[in-house]
Amino acid sequence: MTSQSLIPQSTSPSEARAEFRGGLVVPTSGWAPGYTQVNMISVPADWAYDVLLFCQRNPKPCPVLDVADPGATTSVLAEGADLRTDIPRYRLWRDGRMEAELDDVVDHWRDDLVTFLIGCSFTFESPMVEAGVPLRHVEQGRNVSMYRTNLECRPAGRMHGPMVVSMRYIPESLVETAFQVSARMPAVHGAPVHVGDAEALGIADLAQPDYGDSVEPEDGDVPVFWACGVTPQAALLASKPPFAITHAPGHMLITDVPDSDYRIP
């Protein structure tokens, strides 16, 4: 297993997936710019309806872009990709507890697993950079900061839990630009859910994220919060299904779909 903070800007989605399949473990923010990234959650078929309904009822944090057939290891979003190997890091869950983080899940895959691929805010980062919005976590070589909030998702069957948000420090003068750019991409979380006071979301300390890394602000920055596709993992903690596989937060599947496909004109 290797890791690095250097992001090869010219990497294509297939080249990035090959790197991860070969053992590179690194957060995917900034990789293959211009292409859609997705969160992953795989659950046994008898939990799939609960997850689907949970996502349908909570589209802001859980916008579904694809659902695979039971046991399938591929997706129409990424030709030739293997869902078991082409994400940099995975999480294995049993009874609502994160049991292990793994570089691949080939040995743990099951024929009854239904995989959901959920839009990721990394997808609108390239358009934000193009619009002149800096990304502090990329500049600092860190994973984005993510937090569980006091905002409860609408429950669905056995699935329930709080919304998770990702946070980016944005210069105050560019908050409106970040809002406008991300709002045009509702399939990957869209506009922010909150700007400013973290305590209003039940977040006590921005320097202590629940997932990802702590990121340092620059003078004049304000915290901006987006709904996050790690929300299903918070629901796993609360709902305790017997088995699940997810991506590790910040370590996404990079698809072949241009981010412009999800951008509203």
Image (spheres, rainbow, N blue to C red):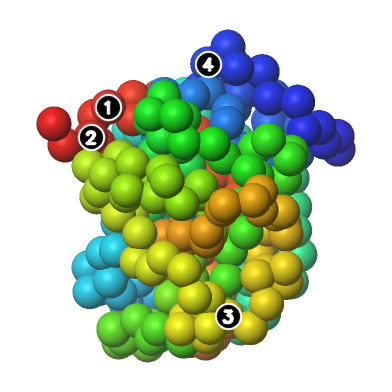
Q: CA distance from mark 1 to mark 4?
A: 16 Å
Q: Nearer the viewer, residue 61 or 155?
A: 61
**Residue that numbered label 2 is attached to:** 263
**Residue that numbered label 1 is attached to:** 260
Mark 3: give few (<14), some (14-19) or many (20+) Cα within 10 Å: some
Residue 157 visible in rendering:
yes
Q: Nearer the viewer, residue 200 or 120?
A: 200
Q: Judging from the image, what secondary structure is the residue with disc 2 in?
A: loop
Mark 2: give few (<14), some (14-19) or many (20+) Cα within 10 Å: some
Q: CA distance from mark 4 to mark 2?
A: 20 Å
- Identified at 30% across, 54% down, the residue is 191
Q: Judging from the image, what secondary structure is the residue with disc 1 in?
A: helix
First reached walking from the N terminus: tag 2 or tag 3: 3
Q: CA distance from mark 1 to mark 2?
A: 5 Å
Labelled disc at residue 73: none
Q: CA distance from mark 1 to mark 3?
A: 33 Å
**Amino acid type at image mark 4:** Ser
**Amino acid type at image mark 1:** Ser
**Amino acid type at image mark 2:** Arg
Q: Nearer the viewer, residue 25 or 49?
A: 25
**Amino acid type at image mark 3:** Ile
Labelled disc at residue 12: 4
In the displayed structure, 31 sits above or below 12; it is below
First reached walking from the N terminus: tag 4 or tag 3: 4
Q: Judging from the image, what secondary structure is the residue with disc 3 in?
A: loop
Labelled disc at residue 203: 3
Q: Does the residue at mark 1 contact the one at mark 2 (Cβ under 8 Å)?
A: yes
Q: Nearer the viewer, residue 253 or 59?
A: 59
